[in-house]
Amino acid sequence: MKLLILNGPNLNMLGIREPDIYGRKTYHELEEYLYTCAAELGIELEQFQSNSEGALVDKIQQAFFHHYDGIVINPAAYTHTSVAILDALKAVTLPSVEVHISNLSERESFRQFSYTALACEKTFAGYGFEGYRMAMRYLFEKYRDKQS
């Protein structure tokens, strides 16, 4: 199974940006954690982070053409604003799961609606880094026999 993990704007600032909300672990620590999780599940993994909406859309489209089996996405602030990312996820029709380190339902009201969730099978929010593992495991268990 081959998964793409996408992280949106400011996630490269983990450990620095609002540590009371996002924790003190760095983005590099997240990357290492995800490779460890993937290895435990026997998943081939590519990770990508961008502060640019267009770069994230391009990567979603590439996932289709490069025959990925699924996408785990933390669109960060684009969660609440990006119809472009929603449309890209819908276009590629790959099984997708949304992840958020913080619990959106406990955040500001403008953060409580997710465009991207409309194209995702499931959302894991408020579990910190563990939410990514949960998303990977969900896709692995549901689709391991349907790999491309």
Image: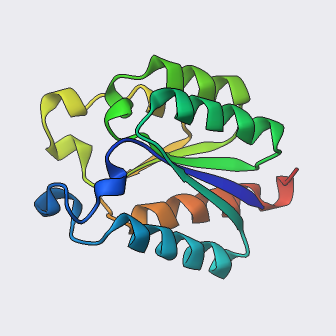
Nearest to the observer: residue 44 or residue 99:
44
Position above or below: 126 against 97: below
From where the camera sits, is residue 142 visible? yes
Q: Is residue 101 visible?
A: no
- Measured as percent of width and height from the top left, residue 74 is found at 43, 46
Q: Give how far across and how far down residue 7 sits, in percent.
A: 46, 48
Quarter of the rendering occupied by the N terminus: bottom right
Q: Residue at x 54, y 35 (%)?
A: 56
Which residue is located at x 54 percent, y 46 percent? 97
Q: Identify whether 6 is placed above or below 40.
A: above
Q: Residue furthest right?
A: 148
Residue 24: % across, % down? 21, 71
Q: Position of residue 34 (x, y in %)?
A: 53, 70
Residue at horizontal 69 percent and vertical 23 percent from the top: 91
Residue 77 or residue 123, whichever sits in front: 77
Q: How many marks?
A: 0
Q: Quadrant of residue 25?
A: bottom left
In the image, is 48 to the left or to the right of 69? Answer: left
Judging from the image, the colouring scheme is rainbow
